[in-house]
Image (cartoon, rainbow, N blue to C red):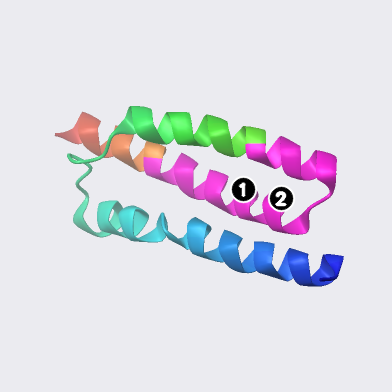
Amino acid sequence: MSDFQIEIIGLIAATFTTIAFVPQFLKIWKKNDASGVSISMYVIMLIGICIWFCYGCLIGSVAVITANVVSGILQIFIIALALIHRNKN
């Protein structure tokens, strides 16, 4: 299997793991309610994502870098929205 084919598999996996956070983001955004969200879990996940991003940079993997940039942005939005909506309630 070529490096390109391996990277494609990584991009497909990265797409699925990254979009897994979209429903949570949309639920908080639409309902203005973050009562069931564990902020600590998302902070820990964000730390892991930052480490994965660094790893992706070190190995030069577009799939790892891209997935973790997008996932990191989603995590930051989820954390921010959860904090905003928790302070409102």
Residue at x 44%, y 45% (from the top left corner): 77
In the rendered image, the vertical position of residue 44 relative to residue 31, given as above or below: above
Q: Residues within 10 Å of mark 1 (few under 14, many from 20)?
A: many
Q: Residues within 10 Å of mark 2 (few under 14, many from 20)?
A: many
Q: Report x, y in % for residue 41.
A: 36, 32
The residue at which mark 1 appears reads as 68
Magenta stretch encompasses residue 11: no
The residue tagged with tag 2: helix, strand or loop? helix
**From the viewer's perspective, is 69 left or right of 71?**
right
Magenta stretch encompasses residue 69: yes
Residue range in magenta is 52-78
The residue at which mark 2 appears reads as 65
Residue at x 62%, y 54% (from the top left corner): 67
Residue at x 39%, y 37% (from the top left corner): 79
Q: Report x, y in % for residue 32.
A: 22, 50
The residue tagged with tag 1: helix, strand or loop? helix
Residue at x 68%, y 41% (from the top left corner): 53
**From the viewer's perspective, is 66 left or right of 87?**
right
State the image quarter where residue 34 is shown. Answer: top left
Residue type (three-letter) at the residue carrying disc 1 = Asn
- Evaluate if marks 2 and 1 touch, with contact meaning CB atoms under 8 Å apart: yes
